Amino acid sequence: MNNTDKPSTTNPDTASTIDETVDQPCDEINTSEQPSEPSTKEAEQEASSNEPSSQFVDFMLPTGLTNAIGDLGFTHCTPIQGATLPYSLSDFDVTAQAQTGTGKTAAFLVTIFTQQYEFPLTTPNPPGTPRALIIAPTRELVLQIESDAVLLGKYMTSQTMSVVGGIDFQKQKDRLETGSIDILVATPGRLLDFARRRIIDLSKVEILVIDESDRMLDMGFIPDVRRIVMMTPHKRKRQTMFFSATFSEEVMKLASQWTIDPAHVVISPDSVVTDTVEQQFWAVSTNEKRNILLKILEQDLHTRIIIFVNRRDQTRSVNSFLSANNIHNEVLSGEVPQKKRISTLDKFKSGKIRVLVATDVAGRGIHVDDVSHVINFDLPEEAEDYVHRIGRTGRAGSQGTAISFISEDDAFNIPAIEDYLGHTINCQHPEFDDDPN
C-alpha cells in the first residue's frame, strides 16, 4: 500500500504483492475456468449467491487476526465476506451490497487489519494522521464499528479511534494530538471540524471506507463526504470501498467518481428480508396498541426487544406508559443526549435492560446480537425503513420475530412495503399463548 499506484481490475498483472498471500477464493467468486481476477461485471454475477461461503483460514490472514476471529466464535465467512475479501485483500476497489446483519463491517475491517499488517510503516505517521478512514452516517454506527474493530484487532498493533459529534470534543482532540491512530472511524461533521482545525490530516489515508452509503445520501451528508474525499490522496493512491444495504443510482454515480474499476459485489437473497426473521402483521386499533404491547412484554418470551415508533414524542409516551406498568425500558432518539444514548446501548448489550423504545435514526446504529423481537408500534412511512428495522433481529444466523401493528392509520403505508417486499401482507388478529380461543 503506502499510497503507491494500485492495480486495476482490468489489468490483473499489476496486482499488489499481497495477492500472493491469498489462497484460492471461495466458489462464489472463482472457479478453475475463470480468469484469476474476474471483471467487475463477472464479480457481480458470481457473487449473487447465498450458498455457504469459504472459511477465514482460506485467506491466509495474519495469525493475530485469525485468533481474534476464532475468539469471537467464527470460522466461516458470511456470503458478503467470502465474496468481497478476494478483491479487497488484493487492493481492488469494492462496492459491496448486502442486507443488514450479514457481516459487512467485518469484511472491511479484516481487509484493513490485513493490509496494515502486510505493509507496516517504517516510520510512524504524525499524530492525527490515520492510515485507514471509515465514514459512517450515525454516531451509534461509528461506535459500533469501533467496538468491532477493538475485538478483531486485539492481537494486532493497529490503533483504532472514533470521532463523533455531541460528546467528548476535548478528549478526542487530546488523543488525536498525542497518539498514533491507524484506523479512524468518524461521522462526517466532526471529522470535517477536526480536519479544518488541522488536528486530523487525511493526506496519508491508504484505505477509505464509506459505510451505509445510501443512508449517507438520505441524511444529506454527501456534500460533507465530498469535502472529506478531496482531503484524501487521489483515488489511484488509495483503496476505496463502499458498503451498504442498498445502492441507488445516485450512490453508484458517486462510487464511479471515487473508485477505479471497482468489483461490484452483490449478495442477492431470495427476498429483501432475511429468512431468519418471522414477520407478523397484527390488525389493531390505535387505542389497542399500548395494551397489546404490554401483553407481549408481560409474556416474557423475549431476550431483548426493540420497539420502533415514528416520532420522538412517541418514544417518550411509550416509555412513560411502560414504566408506569413496571416494564423497565429506555429510549433511543435524536433528542437523547449522546452520552445517555451510549450508556443506554451498553446496558442493552449487556442485558441490564431488555426493552428499547427507538426512532429510525437512532435505531439504525443498533447492532446487537440476540434481539429476539422487533415491534413496529407504528408502521414506518418508508418501506426501506421497515427492512432496516426488522433487520435488528434475526442476526448472525439466529431466529427473530418482527411484529407490526397495523391500525387504520398504518394501513396507508402497507402498499409501499408490499411493493418493496415483493409480496402481499396478510394481517391477522393478535394471538397470545393464554388466549382461550
Image (cartoon, helix red, strand yellow):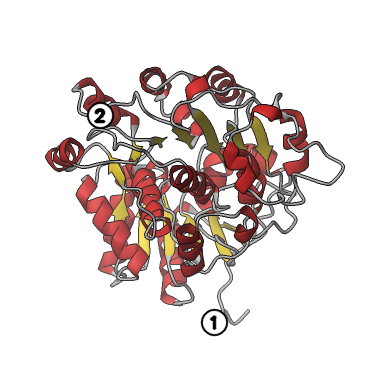
Q: Amino acid at mark 1?
A: Asp
Label 1 sits on residue? 434
**Residue at the spot 59% in from the left edge and 38% down from the top edge:** 17
Mark 2 and mark 1 residues within 8 Å of each other at the beta carbon: no
Distance CA(mark 2)–CA(mark 1): 59 Å
- Around disc 1, counting alpha carbons within 10 Å, would you say few (fewer than 14), some (14 to 19), or many (20 or more)? few
Position of residue 73 measured from the top left corner of the image (x, y, whole percent): 52, 69
Direction from residue 301 to residue 15 in the image, left or right: right
Q: Which mark is residue 407?
A: none
Judging depth in this view, the residue of 312 and 405 nearest the camera is 312
- Around disc 2, counting alpha carbons within 10 Å, would you say few (fewer than 14), some (14 to 19), or many (20 or more)? many
Pick out the residue farthest to the front.
122
Position of residue 280 measured from the top left corner of the image (x, y, whole percent): 61, 60
Label 2 sits on residue? 200
Circle 2 SS class: loop
Circle 1 SS class: loop
**Looking at the image, can residue 195 be seen?**
yes
Q: Is residue 274 above or below residue 4?
A: below
**Quarter-wise, where is residue 164 in the image?**
top left
